[in-house]
């Protein structure tokens, strides 16, 4: 066996294992672990529905005039005792009339500065006006079911619960574009993984669309933080508290208007992923907290770092091994078919032709491409922490 063949086999088999584990295997492993845990300890308690502490509901906004009325109406109609709920909208930097709209509602505390400092800076400032023990952050372009707050706060009856994340759901349409088809499938699988993570130990990264935490555990975020929700939830987990996932508290959001808009969002997330990994090195230490390190590396770090690189290397390595065995021929053909499907999905998306089956590989390709683009932005320091809005469909009230 010559050197090229040997190295090709090493790259191929390591790549195949890591790629499979990252996107499929981890879910299988966690499902098995959770089943075993249930055999010995039963299911985790779902919280105390009678526990109703004071809550601050905070909505950071930047130029959300198109959807802000729907969000205000939805927030006011949330089913929670009004004497225990404080609603805060922070609109720093908005210049499209968003603050003026919020001003019309006396039941809402408006915080506004003309200067745009980014979401993390806005959240740090908003927290100075919070006096309640529980805080909930929610994005302006989402709609929440009425029982959301009750579903979230019931978990805080457990003193070991430090944060609770809701579920992100994509509003589906009969005629989906590439972005909505791919994003919808992605979030359904991601929700499954989060349910497994939560029941086993803790989730590793909350959904910023709907995220809550104990006020006492909040520490100001660096103002250049890109993924504020992720960093805050991970730092709470590092303190030894559980970050719980509650799928009955969900945020409805339309998909990005196009794959181009979704790519812009994904690149920002991946740049934030690299930044987060550089600041959460201790969370990868299995000797400090084994389960947190195992989940963080398996669920996040691999996706944001080595797995896309191995995907890139697998195809040429597999090609060099094509005549070695029929197994290599089958897998090479499957890889080529996948990338052809992604290219056809790209072609159809650009012509607004909808074939959902082909949009999924296209979305997967875009997701992994964003890791490389995000890394370049992170290294060059080009990714701003300020809001970088992606165009989405109108929120349905």
Image: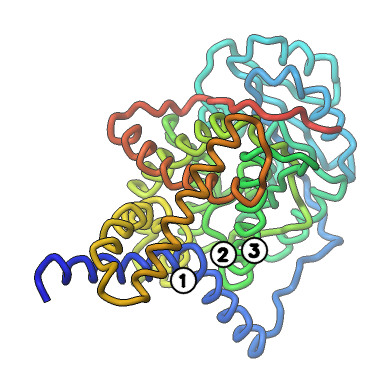
| Earlier residue among tags 1 and 3 | 3
Cα gap from disc 1 to disc 2, whole angstroms: 8 Å
Q: Is residue 226 visible?
A: no
The mark that comes first in sequence, 3 or 2, is: 3
The structure residue drawn at horizontal position 60% and vertical position 36%, both measured from the top left corner, is: 348
Look at the image and tell me in which quarter the C terminus lies. top right
Q: Secondary structure at mark 1?
A: helix
**Foreground disc of the pair 1, 3:** 3
Picture quadrant of residue 112: top right
Residue that badge 3 annotates: 192
**In which quadrant of the rendered view does residue 175 lie?**
top right
91 vs 368, left or right, is right
Q: Residues within 10 Å of mark 3 (few under 14, many from 20)?
A: few
Residue at image location 77% in from the left, 59% down from the top: 154
Which of the numbered marks, if any, corresponds to residue 291?
A: 1
Q: Residues within 10 Å of mark 1 (few under 14, many from 20)?
A: some
- Relative to 141, does residue 285 appear above or below in the rendering? below
Q: In x, y percent, where is residue 224? A: 42, 30
- Give x and y (percent) for residue 281: 33, 55
Residue matched to label 2: 202
Residue, x 71% and y 42% (percent of image)? Answer: 132
Secondary structure of the residue carrying tag 2 is: loop
Distance Cα–Cα, label 3 vs label 2: 13 Å
Question: Taking 316 as reference, is 261 left or right?
Answer: right
- Residue 192, image x and y in percent? 64, 63
Q: Does residue 81 lie above or below 353 as drawn? A: below
| Mark found first going from the N terminus, 1 or 2 | 2
What is the crowding at mark 2: few (fewer than 14 residues within 10 Å), some, or many (at least 20)? many
Q: Going by the picture, which residue comes out furthest to the left?
A: 2
**Contact check, label 1 and label 2, Cβ < 8 Å:** yes
Question: As drawn, is 205 to the left or to the right of 284?
Answer: right
């Amino acid at each position: 066996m010559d050197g090229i063949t040997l190295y090709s086999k090493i790259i191929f088999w390591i790549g195949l294992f890591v790629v499979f584990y990252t996107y499929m295997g981890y879910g299988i492993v966690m499902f098995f672990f959770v089943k075993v845990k249930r055999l010995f300890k039963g299911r985790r308690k779902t919280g105390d529905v009678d526990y109703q502490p004071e809550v601050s509901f905070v909505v950071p906004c930047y130029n959300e005039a198109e959807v802000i009325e729907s969000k205000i109406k939805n927030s006011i109609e949330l089913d929670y005792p009004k004497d225990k709920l404080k609603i805060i909208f922070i609109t720093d930097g908005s210049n499209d009339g968003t603050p003026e709209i919020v001003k019309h509602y006396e039941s809402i505390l408006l915080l506004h500065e003309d200067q745009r400092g980014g979401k993390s800076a806005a959240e740090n400032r908003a927290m100075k006006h919070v006096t309640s023990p529980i805080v909930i952050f929610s994005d302006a372009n989402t709609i929440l079911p009425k029982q959301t707050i009750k579903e979230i706060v019931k978990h805080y009856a457990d003193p070991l619960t430090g944060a609770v994340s809701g579920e992100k759901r994509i509003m589906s349409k009969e005629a989906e574009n590439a972005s909505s088809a791919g994003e919808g499938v992605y979030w359904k699988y991601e929700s499954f993984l989060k349910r497994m993570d939560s029941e086993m130990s803790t989730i590793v990264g909350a959904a910023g669309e709907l995220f809550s935490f104990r006020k006492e555990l909040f520490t100001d975020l660096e103002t250049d933080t890109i993924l504020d929700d992720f960093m805050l939830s991970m730092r709470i987990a590092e303190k030894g508290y559980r970050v719980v996932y509650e799928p009955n508290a969900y945020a409805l959001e339309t998909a990005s208007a196009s794959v181009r808009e979704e790519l812009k969002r994904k690149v920002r997330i991946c740049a934030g992923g690299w930044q987060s990994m550089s600041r959460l090195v201790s969370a990868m230490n299995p000797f400090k907290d084994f389960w947190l390190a195992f989940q963080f590396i398996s669920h996040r770090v691999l996706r944001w770092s080595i797995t896309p690189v191995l995907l890139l290397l697998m195809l040429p390595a597999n090609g060099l091994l094509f005549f070695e065995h029929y197994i290599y021929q089958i897998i090479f053909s499957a890889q080529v078919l996948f990338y052809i499907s992604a290219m056809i999905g790209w072609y159809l998306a650009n012509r607004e032709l909808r074939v959902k089956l082909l949009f999924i590989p296209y979305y997967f390709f875009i997701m992994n491409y964003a890791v490389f683009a995000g890394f370049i932005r992170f290294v060059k320091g080009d990714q701003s922490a300020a809001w970088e809005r992606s165009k989405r469909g109108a929120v349905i009230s």
